[in-house]
Image (spheres, coloured by chain):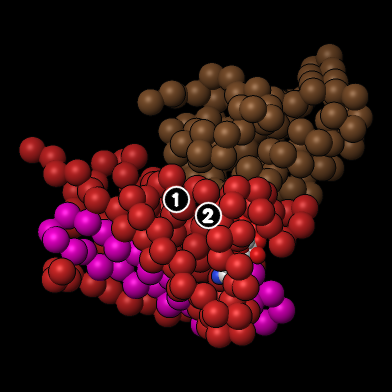
Amino acid sequence: MQITADYRSGRLVIRLAGELDHHSARAALEEVERLLDDYLPRDAVLDLAGLTFMDSAGIALILRTERHMRRTGGRACVSNPAKQPLRVLDAAGIDRMIPVRGGLRP
Amino acid sequence: MKADNYIKIEFPSRSVNEGFARAAAAAFAAQLDPTMDELGDIKTAVSEAVTNCIVHAYPDSIGRVTLRLRIIDGGTLEISVKDAGRGIADVAKAREPLFTTGGEERSGMGFTIMESFTDSLRVRSAPGRGTTVTMRRAIARRE
Ligand SMILES: Nc1ncnc2c1ncn2[C@@H]1O[C@H](COP(=O)(O)OP(=O)(O)OP(=O)(O)O)[C@@H](O)[C@H]1O
Ligand SMILES: [Mg+2]
């Protein structure tokens, strides 16, 4: 999986692309944590537009990011999930814990 | 209940095989002419069950995982994922949302996701002997 980031005035957009499962999760978690520590953003956006597959490993990554941002006094949100990731987010009830913006609702 | 077609795949509990197991299940399911959404659901359910073997059944070793797929009654996919690992002492508790013995890196949502992406989920487990998770998912007939 690939991770890229864009930072502008307090807002860090982290773009995840490829397949996010337990196999790819450890490296993804480390990279996301590193980005959050480097930029210390006020808002962190996890942009899932490029994710072609995600399972509960993605839920753990999202919740970790949300906790990190809350601890440092910022906010996190999820944006643009494609259909399969969105179905996983919905099954886990993730929008009770973190805002989900955009994406294809079936 | 007659099985129309089936496969069995065995592999070691290495995380690189998670993607392989999903792809194999999707390829086998293709003969039922599933929609993209149905394929996504099948891949997700397989990924959760196989990951549980890798993470929980064999926490400190590499063990054997068996993935069985069969088609029953012409239109239902049965997925069974078996390990000979640690087993689950309290299955009802393990199936509760957010329950995890896996710490920070897990969310405890695997069984919940498997349940919502399939029509039925059965878990048979014995501590020290292993676990078998069996799921069924009907694939809608398309004209
Ligand atoms: N094959 C297995 N062998 C042994 N224990 C298992 C197995 N599958 C599940 N468990 C137990 O059941 C618990 C719940 O599993 P579930 O998949 O719902 O959540 P998780 O794996 O802990 O987290 P997540 O799936 O969200 O990453 C696990 O924490 C583990 O204790
Ligand atoms: Mg799990």
Give amino acid for label 1.
Answer: Glu
Q: Do labels 1 and 2 touch, CB within 8 Å?
A: yes
Q: Quadrant of residue B70?
A: bottom left
- How many numbered marks are there? 2
Instruction: Report the disc number at residue B115.
Output: 1
Image spot of residue A13 (x, y percent): 71, 26
* Nearer to me, B75 or B97: B97
Give amino acid for label 2.
Answer: Phe
Instruction: Report the disc number at residue A43.
Output: none
Q: Quadrant of residue A6?
A: top right
Q: Is residue B38 left or right of residue B124?
A: left
In the image, residue B66 lies in the stretch drawn in magenta: yes
Extent of the magenta region:
B56-82
Image spot of residue A52 (x, y percent): 48, 42
Any idea which chain is the brown one in this picture?
A: A
Q: Is residue A39 left or right of residue B102?
A: right
* Nearer to me, A67 or B91: B91
- Output the chain of dot 2: B
Image quadrant in which the N terminus of chain B is located: bottom left
Image spot of residue B53 (x, y percent): 56, 70
Image quadrant in which the C terminus of chain B is located: top left
* Mark 1 → mark 2, Cα distance in angstroms: 6 Å
Image spot of residue A79 (x, y percent): 60, 25
Residue highlighted by disc 2: B111
For image coordinates 59% across by 76% down, the residue present is: B87
For image coordinates 23% across by 48% down, the residue present is: B139
Q: Does mark 2's beta carbon lie closer than 8 Å to ligand 1?
A: yes
Q: Does mark 1's beta carbon lie closer than 8 Å to ligand 1?
A: no
* Nearer to me, B22 or B99: B99
Q: Is residue B14 left or right of residue A64?
A: left
